[in-house]
Image (cartoon, rainbow, N blue to C red):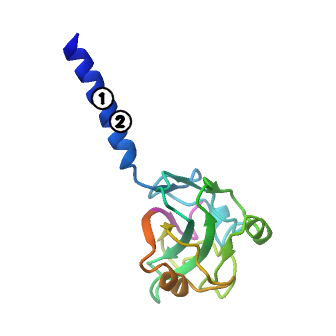
């Protein structure tokens, strides 16, 4: 009986420790990690923003920031989406978010490398590219206005990142 009780408490403690060390996660219900991003999310489709889910946001997070980038672009890393001022209690973003919906939630949108303050879906000139969507838990709410570049956001975040997570999907113009 004592042995079973000790094992039970060891199990409970291990669950608590695992919960304390849970890593923040970002994922999309639209594709598995490393999987194909559907055509509708890219330039050959409807260019809808990808639905995303967030888990295990660390304690002390004041806001979240998000950057979507293509490191396989011919001219170097290409920025597709920049968001900041995301509430720390938000559990995700739905598909096809409009700028008005983002503004209603207090989320600021930055400028992408297409030169737009908007989501710019995957659009590789040739071949298949990888698209990384990075989520940052911050101990601040960035004090930058709408339309900031990813570089400006990085400067604001320096020294304020509690934790980061990422997910990756693949896209080609010849894909589905």
- Residue 171 - label: none
Q: Mark 2 and mark 1: span between their CA atoms?
A: 6 Å
Residue occupying the point 36% across, 38% down? 16
Residue occupying the point 23% across, 22% down? 6
State the image coordinates of residue 15 (x, y, percent, origin top left). 35, 36
Mark 1 crowdedness (10 Å alpha carbons): few <14, some 14-19, many ≥20: few
- Residue 15 - label: 2
State the image coordinates of residue 32 (x, y, percent, origin top left). 49, 52
Q: Is residue 50 above or below residue 67?
A: above
Magenta residues, start to end = 166-176
- Residue 11 - label: 1
Q: Is residue 110 magenta?
A: no
Q: Are marks 2 and 1 in contact (CB under 8 Å)?
A: yes
Nearest to the observer: residue 21 or residue 120: 21
Residue occupying the point 36% across, 49% down? 21
Relative to residue 101, is residue 153 drawn left or right?
A: left
Residue at the far top in the pictured view: 1
């Amino acid at each position: 009986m004592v042995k079973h009780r000790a094992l039970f408490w060891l199990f409970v403690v291990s669950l608590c420790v695992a919960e304390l060390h849970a890593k923040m996660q970002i994922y999309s219900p639209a594709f598995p990690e490393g999987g194909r991003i559907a055509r509708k999310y890219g330039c050959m489709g409807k260019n809808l923003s990808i639905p995303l889910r967030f888990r295990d946001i660390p304690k002390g997070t004041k806001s979240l920031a998000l950057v979507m980038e293509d490191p396989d672009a011919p001219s170097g890393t290409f920025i597709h989406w920049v968001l900041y001022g995301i509430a720390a209690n938000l559990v995700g973003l739905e598909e096809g978010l409009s700028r008005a919906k983002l503004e209603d939630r207090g989320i600021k949108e930055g400028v992408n490398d297409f030169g737009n303050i908007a989501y710019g879906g995957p659009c590789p000139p040739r071949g298949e590219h990888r698209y990384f969507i990075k989520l940052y838990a911050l101990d601040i709410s960035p004090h930058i206005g709408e339309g900031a570049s990813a570089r400006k956001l990085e400067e604001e975040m320096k020294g304020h990142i509690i934790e980061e997570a990422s997910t990756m999907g693949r896209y080609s113009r010849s894909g589905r």
